[in-house]
Amino acid sequence: MGRHNIPADGDPFTTVIGKNDSWYPCPDTASVDRHIVELARRIGHAKRKYPELAKAYRADIDLLLDRRSWLTLTERKDTERKNTERKNTERQIPKQATAEQPVTEAA
C-alpha cells in the first residue's frame, strides 16, 4: 500500500487513489470515463514492455469502475428525488390563466 496522500487541491471525497498512489479526481461519471479511457490507452502502450505497470493500470480501472457504479447509483437516486419534488410542486401550484382561457370567479 502507499501513503495515500491527496494533494492539497484534491477532494478526499471525490478522489480515487490508485495502486501506485496515482490520484484521479472523480466528481462525476464523465470525469471517471475520461480517466478510464486514458488508462486503457496507457495499458496499450505499456503491456509489452512494462507488464507490471499495465497490471497496476488495470487495477486502477477497477477502482474507477467502482467509483462509477457508486456515482451512477447516487445520480439515479438524485434524479428520482428531483422528479418527485417537481411533481409535488406542480400539484401545489394552481393553473394560471391564459389569454385563451381567462380565470372566472365564482359568483
Image (cartoon, grey):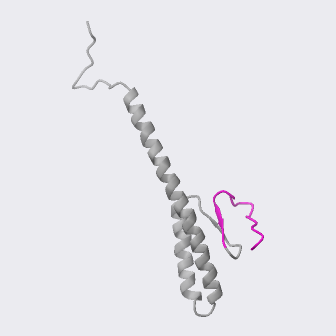
Horizontal relation, residue 7 to residue 27: left or right: right
Tell me which corner region of the image, top left, top right, bottom left or bottom right, holds residue 61: bottom right
* Range of residues picked out in magenta: 1-18
Task: Determine the residue positioned at 57% across, 77% down.
Answer: 39
Q: Is residue 63 or residue 30 the one in the foreground?
A: 63
Q: Quadrant of the C terminus?
A: top left
Q: Could you tell me residue 26's position as x and y percent?
A: 59, 62
Image position, residue 68 (x, y; %)? 53, 63
Indicate whether 89 appears above or below 55. above
Q: Is residue 86 magenta?
A: no
Quadrant of the image containing the N terminus: bottom right
Q: Is residue 105 left or right of residue 8?
A: left
Q: In this figure, what is the number of numbered marks? A: 0
Q: Nearer the viewer, residue 36 or 98?
A: 36
**Looking at this rendering, what residue extends furthest in the top direction?**
107
Q: Is residue 4 magenta?
A: yes
The residue under the point 74% across, 64% down is 7
Looking at the image, residue 14 sits to the left or right of residue 8; the answer is: left
Q: Residue furthest left?
A: 100
Q: Position of residue 65 (x, y in %)?
A: 54, 68
Name which residue lies at 60% across and 69% down.
Answer: 63
Where is residue 99, by image quadrant?
Answer: top left
Identified at 65% across, 87% down, the residue is 52
> 45 or 60, which is in the foreground?
60
Q: Main secondary structure of the magenta part?
A: loop
Residue 12 x %, y %: 69, 59
Question: Taking 26 as reference, is 75 above or below it?
Answer: above
- Relative to residue 20, is residue 93 depicted above or below? above
Outermost residue toward the right in this view: 3
